[in-house]
């Protein structure tokens, strides 16, 4: 079974003090609104609707926690950088995200989802800064890579890795596409390593994918459906 498959919803919180107390090791998913974070979570979970895929950027303003079947917690952080969010809400989320990243004791690593066409925005850099003092790893998923030619995607990955290396933190990066389900197995290996879990058992979808079985993912091409109207 893949790492995120059969994850179950636990709780949502608008404020840090409303989150369940830190316990099982946690992986947070952050990213700019519309970067493709919900689609990436759904692709990793092989689930059409685990995380809400929004048609309205900036609406998903909660921290949503999911329990992973093999242990561990996935925290879906609110998207940032959407220009039409009121200033007071933007400030609230900047403070909440920075507090969460700096103080959440159970947090093992941060998956930072970026649109491969617009990587490392100013606010992405802030996320890196807030999390860096913890010394824990950040893995950048350069998603929507299907929108770039192979050579442009490769060049982007190289540039992003160089920029991350210059910052000197514990950073890695990879290409990802929720549409084509590329990069799923690579990402799972990183996240499973953070949680101290095996990424996949023999015969599971990612395992077959790694072994070149093109028919393995049953939901190829589905990015996830809209579940909620607003939140
Ligand atoms: P979020 O706001 O970061 O959670 O972004 P969503 O997952 O809601 O995705 C924003 C938009 O980008 C949606 O229209 C998705 O269908 C689209 N999208 C997300 N990932 C991909 C991808 O890998 N490839 C392509 N072509 N489109 C994607």
Image (cartoon, rainbow, N blue to C red):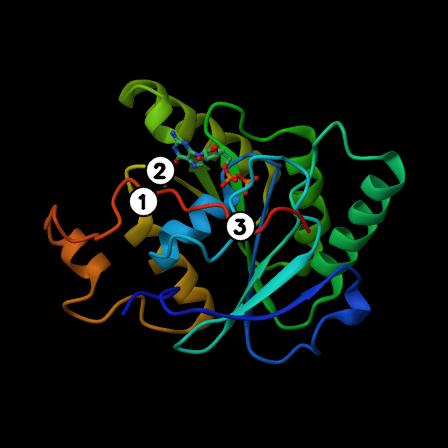
Indicate if the residue with disc 2 has its beta carbon within 8 Å of ligand 1.
yes
Q: Is residue 86 left or right of residue 114?
A: right
Q: Residues within 10 Å of mark 2 (few under 14, many from 20)?
A: many
Q: Is residue 151 left or right of residue 141?
A: left
Name the one closer to the observer, 2 or 138: 2
| Front disc: 1 or 2 | 2
Name the one closer to the observer, 83 or 158: 83
Residue 189: quadrant of the picture: bottom left
Find disc 1 in the rendering and name its residue: 183
Find disc 3 in the rendering and name its residue: 52
Q: Is residue 210 above or below residue 192?
A: above
Looking at the image, which residue is at 25% across and 44% down?
Answer: 220
Q: Is residue 22 left or right of residue 152?
A: right
Q: Residues within 10 Å of mark 3 (few under 14, many from 20)?
A: many
Disc 1 secondary structure class: loop
- Residue 120: x percent and y percent? 58, 31
Disc 2 secondary structure class: loop
Indicate if the residue with disc 3 has its beta carbon within 8 Å of ligand 1.
yes
Name the one closer to the observer, 219 or 206: 219
Find disc 2 in the rendering and name its residue: 177
Looking at the image, which residue is at 83% across and 50% down?
Answer: 95
User: Which is nearer the N-term, disc 3 or disc 1?
Assistant: 3
Residue 208: quadrant of the picture: bottom left
Looking at the image, which residue is at 23% across and 57% down?
Answer: 206
User: Which is nearer the N-term, disc 2 or disc 3?
Assistant: 3
Q: How far is disc 3 from disc 1 in space, using C-alphas?
A: 21 Å
Q: How far is disc 1 from disc 2 in space, using C-alphas?
A: 7 Å
| Front disc: 3 or 1 | 3
Dot 1 and dot 2 residues touching (CB under 8 Å): yes
- Residue 160: x percent and y percent? 48, 31
- Residue 136: x percent and y percent? 59, 59
| Tally of numbered discs | 3
């Amino acid at each position: 079974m893949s790492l995120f498959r059969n994850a179950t919803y636990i709780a949502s919180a608008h404020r840090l003090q409303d989150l369940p107390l830190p316990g099982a090791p946690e992986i947070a998913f952050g990213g700019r609104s519309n970067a493709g974070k919900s689609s990436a979570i759904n692709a990793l979970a092989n689930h059409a609707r685990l995380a809400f895929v929004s048609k309205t950027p900036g609406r998903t303003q909660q921290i949503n926690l999911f329990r992973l079947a093999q242990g561990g917690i996935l925290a879906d952080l609110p998207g940032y950088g959407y220009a039409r969010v009121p200033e007071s809400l933007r400030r609230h989320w900047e403070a909440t995200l920075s507090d969460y990243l700096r103080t959440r004791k159970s947090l093992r690593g941060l998956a930072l989802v970026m649109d491969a066409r617009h990587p490392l925005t100013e606010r992405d850099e802030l996320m890196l800064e807030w999390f860096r003092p913890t010394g824990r790893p950040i893995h950048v998923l350069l998603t929507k890579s299907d929108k770039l030619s192979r050579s442009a995607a490769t060049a982007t990955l190289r540039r992003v890795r160089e920029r991350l290396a210059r910052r000197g933190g514990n950073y890695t990066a990879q290409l990802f596409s929720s549409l084509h389900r590329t990069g799923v197995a690579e990402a799972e290996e990183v996240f499973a390593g953070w949680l101290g879990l095996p990424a996949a058992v023999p015969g599971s979808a990612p395992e077959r994918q790694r072994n070149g079985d093109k028919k393995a993912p049953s939901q190829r091409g589905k990015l996830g459906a809209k579940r909620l109207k607003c939140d």
